[in-house]
Amino acid sequence: MLRRALIVLCAAAPLSAPLSAQFVNRATWLGLDEEGVRRDFRQDQDYFLDRFAYVVAPPWWDRGLLRFGNGARYALGSVTTSKFTVEGQVDHAAPLGSGFAFGYHLLQSEHRDARFLRNAIEFEYEVGPETALFAQGELFADKQWIDASGGVWLWRRGDQALRAMVTVVDAPADKSRDFVYERAPYAVMLAGAFGDPRSHRIVFELGAQLPFEVRATGSPETFAMQRWIGTVESHLVLGGRDRLVLAAEREWTDKDVDSDVPGGALVEDFRRDFRQLRAEWWRDGLTPWSVGVLHTHHGERGLRPNDPAASLRGRHDSWFALVRLQWAVAEPLSFEPQLFAGVVQDRWFDAADLRDRELFQGRLSWNTRFDFSPRSTLVLAVGVQLDELAFGGGGAQFVTRF
């Protein structure tokens, strides 16, 4: 009953799972040196579509993919003349004997606050045919940054599982001379994959950095935050060769800086809200194709009451039609062209930049696919911006199972 309730809950939640369910909680606080109140990289009106085109593979890529299995998935693409967007993971578990196993997990990704590369090692003990306990750590020579996690696997068999984890962020923080937590940071994650690929499959991931407060040593300012990131993707077989893909992603962040000194210029109340919804109708066959729609919303508000000129307000809304195709040329070569076209509303107001515009945006991506084996695929991509008739950058996608 609990498993059925989880499936219904996640299918209805307003949370896109472009990749498989994760072993590492992407919502976890990265530390004062890694992320501040505001984002440290640019996201302009082209960014969201560019990242989607590189990172979210066509739905037929999910054939035979074990969501929690051993393997590597990497996608990257150019979003500016000097920057890539990168989404990658490497996961491997090896049995040790007597019910124990060792795991290694790498996650290279980004959320709306920062880009990051994280490594975790894991020890697991199987307590039943479908149940296991595990302990995970992200290790650093500087002890104050170590994150320690513990969790449980439930209903694990084949390509189905539920994974729950609790993380103590910066677990040895009492050893730090750089900062002190006035409210301890904990993070939680729930990830799962359930269903039959021949009828209905659902994959979800929910990660949260629970509210905390931290103060740098000797600083009059207190930093507080919480962050929630959720994704869900559903594949429903409609009969024959037709499938319906529904996906959603939600990220919400709340950050505050308070100061013991009246009139502190850096005092800020910051909120961010990101939502992305996608629906694709996929027809399988010798030449698979899909058509769909994509909606993205991104809103930011940062208010600095003691320095109102440095406040910001931003809002991005876009609606796109998607057309994707796989055209087999000769083993192991095929082409996967993708067409995206739609309308973008882009509003941004801060001291350095003022814009308020509505514009057409289009992108044609020509992806060349090489299937080294049924287990390994490489795609090389080039794009053209249709609204400007300009080169839209290049990228690559790689998937392997081992």
Image (spheres, rainbow, N blue to C red):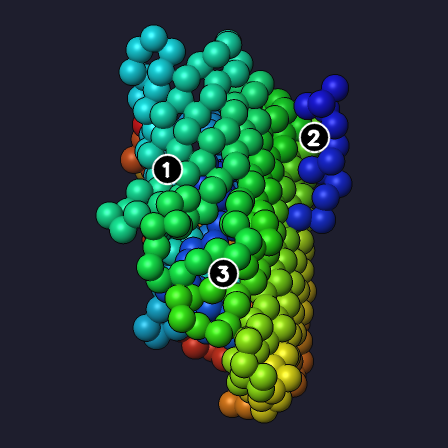
User: In this view of the protein, can residue 223 be seen by the observer?
Assistant: yes
Tell me which label, 1 or 3, sits earlier in the chain. 1
Work out whether residue 40 or residue 381 is closer to the camera in this orientation and state it.
40
- Numbered-mark total: 3
Mark 3–mark 2 distance (CA, rounded to whole Å)? 34 Å
Helix, strand or loop at mark 1: strand
Give the SS element for disc 3: strand
Image coords of residue 171 (percent x, y): 41, 44
Determine the image quadrant of residue 297: bottom right
309 w.r.t. 118: above or below = below
The percent position of residue 199, horizontal first and vertical second, equals 66, 25
Q: Position of residue 3 (x, y in %)?
A: 68, 23
Task: Say which label, 1 or 2, has the lower sequence index.
Answer: 2
Q: Please state which amino acid type lies under the numbered disc 2.
A: Leu
Residue drawn at the location 37% of the way across and 45% of the way down:
172
The residue located at (59%, 68%) in the rendering is 256
**Badge 2: residue crowd in 10 Å (few <14, some 14–19, many ≥20):** some
Q: Residue at x 46, y 68 (%)?
A: 36
Please tell me which residue lies in front, 12 or 142. Answer: 142
Q: Quadrant of the C terminus?
A: top left
Q: Are marks 1 and 3 in contact (CB under 8 Å)?
A: no
Q: Tell me: 305 left or right of 383.
A: right
Relative to 41, is 252 on the left or the right? right
Q: Amino acid at mark 3?
A: Val
Q: Secondary structure at mark 2?
A: helix
Q: CA distance from mark 1 to mark 3?
A: 21 Å
**Mark 2 sits on what residue?**
6
Q: Which residue is mark 1?
A: 137
Closer to the camera: disc 3 or disc 2?
A: 3
- Left or right position of 298 against 338: right
Q: Identify residue for label 3.
A: 214
